[in-house]
Every structure is written in C-alpha cells, then in structure tokens.
Image: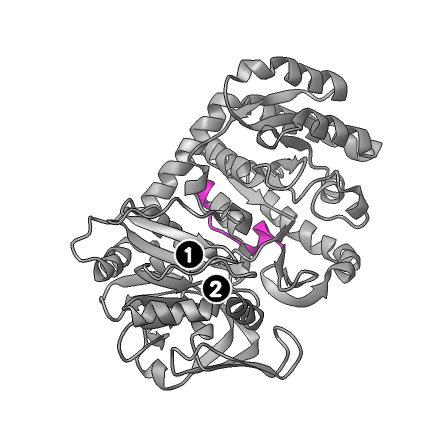
Amino acid sequence: MTASPALSLMFQGTGSDVGKSLIVAGLCRAYANRGLAVLPFKPQNMSNNAAVTADGGEIGRAQWLQARAARATPSVHMNPVLLKPQTDIGAQVIVQGKVRGTAAAMDYQTLKAELMDAVMDSYDHLRGRADLVLVEGAGSPAEVNLRAHDIANMGFARRARCPVVLIGDIDRGGVIASLAGTHAILEAEDRAMITGFLINKFRGDVRLFDDGYRFIADKTGWPGFGVVPFWRDAGKLPAEDAVVLERPSPAAAEKIHIAIPMLSRISNFDDFDPLKLEPDVLVEFVPPGWPLPREADVIILPGSKATIADLNFLRAQGWHIDLLSHLRHGGRVLGICGGYQMLGRTLYDPDGIEGPPGQSAEGLGLLDLNTRFAATKRLEEVSGRHLLTGQPVTGYEMHMGRSTGPATTRPMVLLNDRPDGARSEDGLVEGCYLHGLFAEDAFRAAWLRELRPGRRASTAYAGRVDHLLDGLADHLERHLDLDALLQAARAFRNLP
C-alpha cells in the first residue's frame, strides 16, 4: 500500500438500479485480484438491508458485499450515512454506524448539510488505508431538485475532488437520452467531475450498439470505458433493494417450499439468500394481494423496519388467516427479528421508537411472549448453536426490542452463551433475533432435513458467494477497460 492517499473513483448512475452496487463489487474483486488494496465507500445509502460491522455499527448490505469482494473487513466508515425508511416520508438516520435519530424527508434535506463532515471524515479514514477507494453514488446526479446540500453524488464528488464514471442501464431503454440528458442538465462544475461513462446490462450482440456508443461520446465529450453485457448470475448475489424480489415459477412438487410475505417495510431479506441457492428449495416471496400458500412447508416472517406498522399490513392482506390455516394443516412458521416479535401476544412501544409514544399492538398470538421496544439498539455479531439440531449458527443482532414470556423458556438458539428466541410447545412455531441464521451450511442442511428427511447435501454458501464474485470480476475484466479507469483516476488527481 502506498504512503500517499489512495486513488479514488466514483460510480454514479443515470437513475436508480442501474447496477452501481454490483459494478463496484466486481471492480473491488478485480482490482484486489491485481494486488491492490481496495476499499468500497458509499457516502449515503437508503436501505433496510443492513449488516453489523466488527467495529460495532451498521452499514448497507451492498457495502458489506463490496468489502467482501475487496477481501477487506467491513467498517462503518464504508457507509457513514445510512437511512432506514420507516414510513413513506420518514427514516431512521444512522451516522457512522450509530442511530442519530429519525427525520422526515423534508427535514433531512436540511440535515444533510450537517452530515458532510462525517462523510468526509470516513472517506479520509479509508483513503489513508488503501491504494484505491471505489465510491458508489446514490440515485442519480440528474435529480437536480435535490442538488442543494447533496452528499451522495456531485456534492460529495466536488468536495472530495473525486472523479466520476457515469453508468447507463441499456436494459431499461433510453440509455442514449439518459446519458446525453444528464450531460445537458448538470451545471458546468458538476459536469467537469465526470471522467467518462460505461453502459451496463446489454443483451445481444454488442456490435449493434457501436453507433450509439460513438454518439454518446461525441455528444458529451466523455470517453467510454466499455459495454457490460447482462450478467445472468446477478440475482444469486445478496441484493440490497426489495425491488429485486420476484415470485418464482410454481414450485415443483419435490422441492422444499418456503414462503415469505413481502412486508411493506421488509428488512434484511438477504437472510434467505443461502436458501435460494439450494437446488431442491424454492423460496417464494409473496407480494401484497396474494394469499400465503397453504401447501408451503414453512412460512417465514422476515425482519421489518416498522414492526407494528407491518403487523397491521400483514393483517390487512389477510395473511394472519393464511398462517392459521397453514398451521392447522401441519405447516411450520419461523419468525426472524421483527417477524419473531409479531408472533407474540403484544408489542408495546412506550418511548415512540416506531411511532407515537405509548402505542401497542396485539400480536399474532402464536408464541406466548411479549415485546417491549427500547431506545437502546442492540448491534452485535454473535455465534452459537441451534438447540434442536445442535448445529452452529453465526450472524448478527440488530433490533430495538426485548421479548420476554413463558415461550422464551424454550429458546430456539444460544447466542454468545445466552438463550435467544422461543419455540411453541408443539414445535411448529419458532423465532429468534438472529440475522444471517441460514448462512452456516451445517445448520441449514440440518434445518432443511427436518422439513424433508433424506434431502440432498447442502450448498457451500460462503464459497459460492466468493465464486460468484470472482465470476463478476472476470466478467468486468473482459468488457471494461480497467487500465483506462485507473489512468482516469490518476489523471484527475494530478489536475491542479
């Protein structure tokens, strides 16, 4: 690692979901494979899919994956501002891993100006520890209505003097107009930060886009760094945004069928990625308006950023009735974190953690326990074992509630030598606070055998993720000019 501050390169998009997170993850692995010390960075993220870091905070799940791609230890400095939506107009604000408070969308626009110092502090922290920092923007710099006090795109790029590569998504159409239009509406100082562009998610013969590629370069004056064909394994890596969740085709009769309701504030849905990679398992995310399938082997209630609101949402879909029918026919139910809390008798929020102080809600009554929300958030990496199978489990806790009651005398797991979770007397309903429950291969295999004795061996999940990251890195090496990207970063640093 060099003694001087790291090179840096920022990837912004012409819109949301253009593939910024995966591009950065793939480049983290590709440059790490070249022997560079690489670290990811995202100034501001909005996601309810988060991970706990070894330095005691939380970051967006995409930055956790990018750190893994870079073979680096995840740190709160990789995502210094994390917004976790609780309502359509408000979010919990996490700064350098810790809860700062909650803010309505309009109020946050003012608060952003106060957060730039934390963003720059984290960025400088990483630059002193790497050869290359790869930065991911948020949304699009074309959202000029949000330009004032921006800390996620051009506001950060100009403050940090970090060159920008603009990503266009050809799969959604209009990529020429989106790139040329972004060039047209940016103010001159912002436009000057862009060092080039790339095209993502191309399907078919890339030569058909040669004229379009040249048109963009001629119209904008930006050089192109390449056209990335659609990578079909993208859906097998952990995703950050719930928009990627899809219903699969109907389950084959021989597959283990796991159904998960898509709550309005679903969080940490990547808990189920290891299950999705199992060849004899079908994971079905059930959208609002659809019934939970009675024939499923197990229904899992996932985490939620607004548990009481999502409990009401669950009832509004009629899913509470579907759960009872599922249990009457011998099905099983598992709750994780917020989903575990919903399985109890009551939820009480005396301090207004999720809404007005003093609100309470009647739970589903499937476990004899009660949950009380508290202002102190538990953020901790944990390990232990699943009591029924005796298999090891690892992951993290990330919650602001405490659950007590008779059912907790039948805990589901031991975490750091303390009991956690609960099981019903008949064993059909259980839950715990452990995110990442299914990542351990031996536990996942044993749990699935409980559902379907005689099933095949489990997939090696951690190795599979690393294999996919290597495949993504190879894909980008073939289709992007990685040498030119590094040279663009060097040239920009040398500008006066």
Which residue type carries mark 2?
Gly
Give the quadrant of residue 451.
bottom left
Decide: is 326 above or below 180.
Answer: below
Q: Earlier in the sequence, mark 2 or mark 1?
A: 1
At x 34%, y 72%, the residue is: 430
Decide: is 211 above or below 233.
Answer: above
* Lateral position of residue 419 relative to residue 480, left or right: left
Which residue type carries mark 1?
Asp
Discs 2, 1 touching: Cβ within 8 Å: yes
Magenta range: 68-80
Residue identified by numbered label 2: 303
Q: Magenta span has 88? A: no
Q: Position of residue 287 (x, y in %)?
A: 50, 55
Tell me the element at label 1.
helix
Residue identified by numbered label 1: 271
Q: Magenta: predominant secondary structure element?
A: loop
Pick whichever, 282 or 213, lies toward us: 282
Is residue 413 visible in the rendered image? The answer is no
At x 69%, y 50%, the residue is: 120
As drawn, the residue found furthest toward the bottom would be 406
